[in-house]
Image (spheres, rainbow, N blue to C red):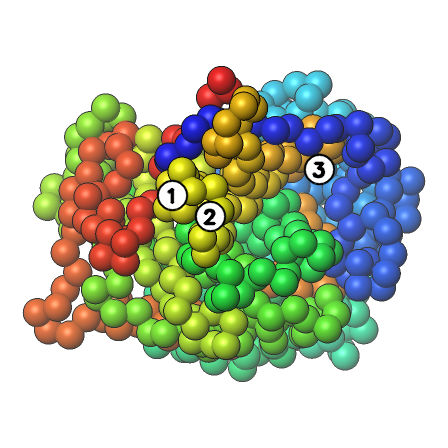
Amino acid sequence: MPSDTNATAELNPSTATSAAAGKKVPAAPPAALARGEGPCGPAGECKAPPCSLVIFGAGGDLTKRLLVPALYNLVVDGLLDDGMQVIGVNRGERGTDDWRDDLHASLQQFAAERSSSGKADEASWNWLAQRLQYIAGDFSTPDTFERVKQAIGKSGCSNAIFYLAVGERFFKPVVEQLGKAGLLDEEGAGGFRRVVIEKPFGNDLASARDLNQHILTYAKEEQIYRIDHFLGKETVQSILAVRFANALFEPVWRREYIDSVQITAAETLGVEGRGAFYEHTGAFRDMVPNHLFQLMAMVAMEPPNSFDAETVRDKKAEVFEAIQPLRAEDVVFGQYEEGPAGVGYRKEPNVAPDSTTETYAAARVHIDNWRWGGVPFYLRTGKRLNVRRTEIAVQLKRVPFLMFRDTPVDSLTPNVLTLRIDPTHGTRFDFNVKVPGPTMRMGHVRSTFDYNDFFKEQANVGYETLLYDCMLGDETLFQRADSIEGSWAAVDAVLHPTAGGAMRVHGYAAGGSGPAEADALLARDGRTWRPLDDEPKRR
Ligand code: BG6
């Protein structure tokens, strides 16, 4: 990074809006924003309607680590109705008390790690605990669904959400059984009936189409909530706010001014005991056509006329339609080998010793439309890298010439707006100023906005907004069938290369920055990846 000086120009937290001062205030949900309302407070306004939340896969990791902590956070924020109940369904024979104790232990661990007090609020937990009920049953047996029906009936509230926190092989049978048991019939029930489906939504275009077709035999599109948890991340939701609530950015948000966009989801973790799942998924399917494409769509979509779910989703769908189908030469796969961060992928449990599954993927994507023609979007993701970082860096073009003759234009640091998603949340802007002193020298500086400087820290797991929106019936942050299929269509040629054209998988050191071939992908275009560990040092 060529620069005469590096300094971080912090914004002044004293200019924070009122939300910073008071109690924890959740972000305004899109539905509320759409109605032009302000953020909902903890006083009880904007409560979600009462409903039964039926979780299939109640004994799984997702339920313990993410869904129940998210529900608990919604309780703390006063956003759940007294008429709410949570019905957990799983195969294991156990009682409600046992399930409840298990969830309580996980919640305490979550609070110890993530909440500022280090403890769960017992009153909020008790509120939730009283509303938990466990049903032991097989996901493909009609009897299980009859018992779910009875439990919903007893609650006295006809609204229900069926959350499929189960392996993908259960998606079809659970939806089928729900349909056959009449549990998805909204008219008959006299309330809403919604189905939340986790990823992976298919493994390629054909399987995604097949899954959509199957599900839509039993439910209407507007009953289906396909979740991508990246869309629940605070800074991801903020992308639209940064773009469309500031006059500064949108005028330059186009090919005339933007050089390229880099989207990174780098992880230090390896496959963490998920070897069996990962072996047949790989980094590309796991992250690119879903999480990274969703981030790309938020950056690339045209301004919607409103924040109405269909309008926003129409704009996103247009982006997926405009993606130039990826070719093998646009993609680089890597696999971590032994390095400073530990053993290689092939030595992980449940991984074949000669596995060719990729743990790293980089791609160059082009969006063929008027706004983005010629602007490459570079995407990369990988396990066991040197840094944990999810961010979007929008790099502007260089100025056309520099009147300060001694400083060549190409020695200037380009302007880059970085939307920082994890682990820090905020934005950063790189620009040039004059270095203090008698001569005219250019210096590179950074202006950093960190959410925690302005707003009270939230122990958010990212599922709060998604669950809450589902209860409100707001589908803005959920994916429609056409977007899912559009994403898979754009990458299908990479997933199913023609004979002899199988993707090569290049090695990289565990704890390194990825394979050299990923650097070559950008070098071909005369560009480089942004360094993963580029925190500036104050001089
Ligand atoms: C999941 C992937 O969808 O997202 C994981 O299956 C990945 O492999 C995870 O680690 C990353 O999510 P986050 O929120 O930790 O960045």
At label 2, counting other C-alpha atoms closer than 10 Å, the crowd grade (few under 14, some 14-19, many 20 or more) is few
In x, y percent, where is residue 532? 38, 36
* Residue topped by disc 1: 408
| Residue 500 sits above or below residue 84 on the image | below
At label 3, counting other C-alpha atoms closer than 10 Å, the crowd grade (few under 14, some 14-19, many 20 or more) is many
Q: Earlier in the sequence, mark 3 or mark 1?
A: 3
Query: Which is more toward the observer, 97 or 324?
Result: 324
In x, y percent, where is residue 422? 52, 38
* Residue topped by disc 2: 402
Q: Secondary structure at mark 1?
A: loop
At x 8%, y 69%, the residue is 500
Q: Is residue 286 left or right of residue 84?
A: left
Q: Is residue 274 visible?
A: no
Q: Nearer the viewer, mark 3 or mark 2?
A: 2
Q: Secondary structure at mark 2?
A: loop
In x, y percent, where is residue 15? 80, 33
Which quadrant holds residue 156?
bottom right
* Residue topped by disc 3: 72
Q: Is residue 203 left or right of residue 501?
A: right
At x 55%, y 35%, the residue is 433
Q: Earlier in the sequence, mark 2 or mark 1?
A: 2
